[in-house]
Amino acid sequence: MRNTLILFLVALALGAYVYLYEYKGEEQRQKAREKEEKLIAFDEGEISAWEVENGGRRIRFEKKDDQWRITAPVKTDADGATVNAFLRTLTGAKKIRTFSLAGKDKNQYGLNNPQLSLRIEGPDGSDSLFLGADAAFGDNIYAARDDSLVMVTPAVLKRNAQKSLFDWRDKKALHFDKEAVKRIELKTPRGTFEFAKEGVEWQLTRPIKSRADQAAVRALLNKLDFGRVLAVVTESATDLGVFSLQNPAYKIDLYQGENQSRSGVSFSRPEGKMVYGKDDARPHVFKVDTLFMEPFNKTLYGFREKKLADFRPGSIRRIKLENGGRTMSFKRDTSSQWIALNDSGEIRNIKITTMLSALSNLKARSFLDGKTGSLKKYGLDKPVAIVELYIDEQPELRLEFGRVTQKARYVRNTLSGQIVTVKEADIRDILLTHDDLFKKK
């Protein structure tokens, strides 16, 4: 019994030794080897500031509230994605080979007076790194710290460090929170427009009150959010008139959140294919191309909703169509088939499906705003056709179709009172006759 206990304790001790030395010890040794292989001792999250000097031009970066800023030679926001990508490359770089420079000429390795150097700062001090000439083998370079040890590391680190100030800096035309925008004011050579967000939809509030084209408003905001400037022409403009920004051709103001905090940006008229711009909150003047301006350069027609109705074809339960001197009424049964309410003929269901699809996508070609006068001049005093759609008992849509003018037809939405023109080709599947809708007996 005693011998068994002794053997058990020996086995237990041996197991503990194997676990602590072979497994845990190997894990720690592996971490030590990986640390020794790294070009610098810092991990990415430990870096609080860093500098790159390239040909005597020093650029300094500092981290504040998890955002990188350039603090020299100018004070401005850095491009976070570009900085973070470089720091991942830097902290992940490894030594492919090391050798001593003792008694050797640094010049042959490009390290005697290196043009490119890095200085990294963290919680426990700083580290410097000099990047030299291309190595004699592979896509590698020579690098060194302040000591006499030379390291060989992948050349991608040097290529990524050789960026200009513009490459490193933030290139947004305007900083704002897109999801928080509640109101937009837009002044352009084509007019002055205002938009307000109601729920999840945008409404035009100036120069008229109307539902806005949701895609057009999103394109405006997306361009400001994702578009990037092409160049910074001056860090601080003492005379905005030089860039035609004293009285800008384009002015965009975004109001965000409950307190309606404002972010604004101005643009000049195009000069060739270039446009000057300035964020109200920052001193520098930048350039964009005319393509950048396209989402802002719309007329009232471009910014307003052009669809005559907003409904799902599958939600319509009843239809009334007056055309060709006949009134036809249809109702959707429980199997989603259409039945005639005042005719015994067999219905072409596909025709009604096509008609509803055409109505849900019907867009105005032009709008008749203001006082339209007599309905007679539009042929709407005696419409040639009338379409009514019902979801419940109240009509969802009621359109009256008038006379044709220049391949377009006057249409009146009696629920809104709006008169528009639509392309004649767009209503071919809408103004259906009895022969279109019923199969021949």
Image (cartoon, rainbow, N blue to C red):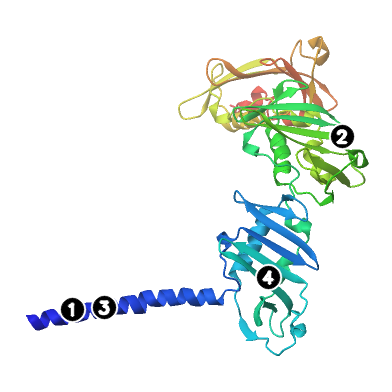
Per the image, the residue denoted by label 4 is: 157
Which residue is drawn at the image coordinates 59% and 33% (left, top)?
350
Label 3 or label 1, whichever lies nearer to me, is 1
Name the mark nearer the viewer: 2 or 4: 4
Could you tell me which residue is drawn at 72 percent across and 20 percent down? 209
* Amino acid type assigned to the residue bearing label 4 in the image: Leu
Callout 1: SS: helix
Q: Which mark is residue 9?
A: 1
Would residue 87 appear left or right of 209 to someone viewing this image? left
Asked if the residues shown at circle 4 and circle 3 are in contact, with their CB atoms under 8 angstroms apart, the answer is no
What's the amino acid at mark 2?
Ala
The amino acid type of the residue labelled 3 equals Gly
Residue at the bottom extreme?
Answer: 103
The percent coordinates of residue 327 (x first, y second) are 63, 15
Q: Earlier in the sequence, mark 3 or mark 1?
A: 1
Label 3 SS: helix
- Nearest the eye: 348 or 404: 404
Question: Label 2 to label 1, Cα distance in Å?
Answer: 88 Å
* Quadrant in the picture for residue 371: top right
Q: What's the residue at 80%, 44% (across, down)?
A: 292
